[in-house]
Amino acid sequence: MNANDDTDVESADVAILGGGLAGLCLAIQLKQQDPALAVAVLERRAHPVREAAHKVGESTVEIGAHYFAHVLGLREHLEREQVRKYGLRYFFCDGERDLQDCNEMGVSRLLPTPSWQLDRGRFENFLGERALELGVDFRHGAVVRTIDLTDGDGMHRVGFEHEGAGHALRARWVVDAAGRAGLIKRKLGLAETNDHDANAAWWRVNGRIDLDAWTDAGNWRTRFQPAERWKSTNHLCGPGYWFWLIPLASDSHSLGIVCDAKMHPMEAMNTHEKAMAWLRRHQPRAAEALEQPQHRLQDFLFLRHFSHGCKRVFSGDRWALTGEAGVFLDPFYSPGSDFIAISNTYICELIRHDFAGEPVGPYAEVYQQLYFSFYENTLTLYQDQYPVFGHPRVMPAKILWDYAYYWSLLAPLFFSGRQAALPVLSRLRPYFAEGRALNLAMQALLRDWGTRDAAASLHGARAYDQHSLDWCRRMNGALTETLDDDAYVARTRVNVAEMRQLAAETLALVRSKFADIDDHGLDALLQGHDTAAHAPMLPLEWFETNLDPAQAGA
């Protein structure tokens, strides 16, 4: 086809630029929503891609896992071909040789709502096959050359090369799912920085990294029994950084250093040799494991200033951005697939409204406002918080708070299918506003606590088991409950009351150590809250003086 010859121009209802995780999932979701919709996906890379593909976003948490398993109906593949995740697990140490000397936080048993570790190559190959089965025009090895938005007849036009020839595609909708290449983002100048200045270096190796085999000391193997640590997304956390270990179903392991750019310069880790030298200083036991000959290096990549915003992601002119082409937060709590799920669902709603003959502009504005609020509120969990990431007492409290915030508001909204239900969202507005205010104050309090508390230098060897906390099991399990609107709003009210309770207990704990610490507005937010009327949420025994080494793991 000649892209300049209108007689050879093809047409589609929706053109998706990028056939990675975000683009292929969107294509599948659109075809499931409306099988008659003509959807075309243009992907630069040829398929099938190799397994253990060199991409971030291998760890899922509740929203993303629910999206893949139930919204897209892919649970059978996840159970059969991917690794069922044993939660997020954290070790708070720096320079320790043996992890049994570190405070550890995770679950001894799986929480009710599942998640998975994704071999991205294997998963995207499967998504490509599934998209073709549904009738998606999936063209891999296609390179987009031009994008003309609304080229005069109300249609967008995309010029691309495929199989050595020029092609053109006219589409009513165009969605940028091209990752950091950001095709529409670059064309329209939509890139926007944020104040979260962090860098990352990551690589893959052959074989499984089994943390349970790292030491025979004490009761290392049993303090979280029967958990299988290697199946977790493991975080080795120190001041200003964390190091991930994620198992892949292709018998590979994903590894990465993420750090505050001010505390750990990228120049110290921008090659594999430098990254390993950095690891020997900060996490020597991990470095020792990785130096075993069976763990052959597969690849290496680094990225500066990975977190970014976007000026616009949804337009009434029938274009949109999803995945990393839009916004990207931070991988610490694995939110990447969550935000793909949320943005793709909003895009599906916009396209549904459009093909139903409804005006799209007002919905695009409202959905974008909601999406940006989710992004901005979640960003507060990471921004300026890296200095306390290795703190053995502050971080368990922070992680409990961050989970409670996520399970109370954003996760239930997506699970219940209400993220675009405007009448219900109007009723929820005061609870989301209160949750946001509580979270801002709590992040500031936690940061101050970590700055003032010298306990980060102490050895603890405590085991913080989230499964032992009733409210963690209950909030996590409640995500899959089916409620009518009134019951859902009532449960959100209870969730926010529990957030108040956790905030009040945390503030009291911090004041017991630092009576003069700034409350950052929490006293006003907690006015009238009766702590005694609620079940305790913060396990105070977690925050007492660190145990003697002889009591490690108790």
Image: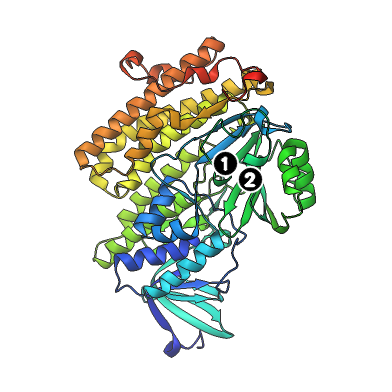
Point 50% across, 43% down: residue: 86
Point 35% across, 65% down: residue: 30
Q: Is residue 340 visible?
A: yes
Tell me the element at label 2: loop
Residue 51 placement, left or right of 16 = right
Residue 427 falls in which quadrant of the image? top left
Q: Nearer the viewer, residue 7 or 95?
A: 95
Relative to 264, say whether 392 is above or below.
Answer: above
The residue type indicated by label 2 comes to Asp
Which disc is residue 254 wearing?
none
Residue 134 falls in which quadrant of the image? bottom left
The residue type indicated by label 1 comes to Arg
Residue 536 falls in which quadrant of the image? top left
- Quote the CA–CA distance across marks 2 and 1: 7 Å
Tell me the element at label 1: helix
Count of numbered circles in the view: 2
Q: Nearer the viewer, residue 339 or 280?
A: 280
Within 10 angstroms of label 1, few (less than 14), some, or many (20 or more) residues? many
* Mark 2 vs 1, N-terminal side: 2
Residue 9 percent coordinates (x, y): 44, 84
Tell me the residue that label 2 is attached to. 210
Q: Is residue 19 visible?
A: no
Point 75% across, 47% down: residue: 275
Which disc is residue 229 wearing?
1
Relative to 366, say whether 543 is above or below.
Answer: above
Residue 459 percent coordinates (x, y): 67, 22
Point 48% across, 26% down: residue: 442
